[in-house]
Amino acid sequence: MMDIAQLTIFIRGEEILNIKSMHGTTTGKDIFKIHLHSNRKHVTSTVAIRAVDPNDPNSESVLSQLAKTEISLTLTSKFELLEGDDRDLKTLSTKTKKLIVDVIWIQPGETLPEILETPATAAQESEHTRIVERRAVQDAQTPEGLKSSPALLEDIQLPLEQKKRKIIRNLRNLEQAGLATASNKYQDLINEISKDIRYQRRYRQRRKAELVKLQQTLTALNSKTAFYQDQMNYYDAYIKTCLDNLNRKNSRRSIKLDGKGDDKGSKKWKPQSLKYTAAKLHEKGVILEVEGLQTNQFKNVMFDISPTEEVGDFEVKAKFMGVEMEKVQLHFQDLLQLQYEGVAVMKMFDKAKVNVNLLIFLLNKKFYGK
């Protein structure tokens, strides 16, 4: 069972008055006047009634006085949602009108009672059967969510004479409820059918226009998605190039510092690792705490950070009180992502709490610095 709640918003009169027209049609002032006019029987103030009088010379000042009035607006569906007996009668009326359309499509006449009282010919019954069979084929090809209800399908598949008898029974019930009048030969109901057909055409036109707009929106979104994907690929390539360049600069600097600049290409450069005690990293603010250890015991914890062949990746080894821990792979991109997400502290080896920003600073300084 669905719980359908109506949306209600509360808005001040001055907010409505400030609504501007986009296409030169209804303005906020028009809406405000219509609201007051529709509710003037509930308003005891003579000022509110004067506000809807366009000939009143003080109407502008009255509107400004009422600008602070709070108005409630309830969102309702254009498709009427009824409950109880009203809903049943609305459904009965809709089914009856559909049956009437099926009958007068095959068997024309001057008035509805005349058509219902005149027996259908064999040719008319055959034509009706062909239409019903054609509809059954179309309905079988319709997606599950768009198919007609079983009760409506059952009515549609009835023979022509049975449809007439059902229309007559339904008309009696509608007349008792005041929704149909036999004295005018149910002309009001026929007028409603013609209005429904006319509005149905307008609705289809609106729906077609909305589908075109939605398609345009989808195309624009796909275009933006492709554009941002290209941008992401470009920035990823740019960042990788920057890391490659930094790594090459660091490689050349390390060769010169080792005094091996004259022996170019004779030996493959081996990346230098960083070795720190937890106490030293604690002084730098990189290590915040190590679970189970006091600060004076940090000197017994060693960290070894080495760059790998993959640019931006590091291998971290650690010894806690002489016990060697498993190696941890540290990805520079992951650290940048944590920094972007505002994560200040991360855990390493499930024991050490590390300051993300200062770890990034340390790696930048030691491996990517000039």
Image (cartoon, grey):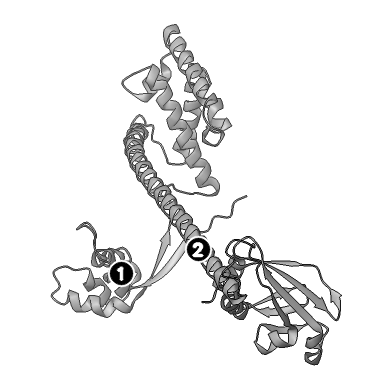
Q: Residues within 10 Å of mark 2 (few under 14, many from 20)?
A: few
> In this view of the protein, which residue sits in the foreground, 213 or 228?
228
- Amino acid on which the number 2 mark rests in the picture: Ile
Residue 258, placed above or below residue 157: below
Question: Disc 2 vs disc 1: which is toward the camera?
Answer: 2
> In this view of the protein, which residue sits in the foreground, 47 or 296?
296
Question: Which of the numbered marks, if any, corresponds to residue 16?
Answer: 1
Residue 279 horizontal/vertical position (percent): 74, 88
Mark 2 highlights which residue?
239
- Amino acid on which the number 1 mark rests in the picture: Ile
Furthest residue toward top: 122
Furthest residue toward front: 262
Residue 39 horizontal/vertical position (percent): 33, 66
Provide the secondary structure element on which disc 2 rests.
Answer: helix
Marks 2 and 1: CB-CB under 8 Å? Answer: no
Regarding residue 348, the answer to whether it shows in the image is: yes
Q: Residues within 10 Å of mark 1 (few under 14, many from 20)?
A: some
Q: Residue at the location (59% across, 62% down)?
A: 311
Q: Quadrant of residue 347?
A: bottom right
Question: Which of the numbered marks, if any, corresponds to residue 179?
Answer: none
Residue 64, placed above or below residue 131: below
Question: Position of 159 compared to 38: left or right?
Answer: right
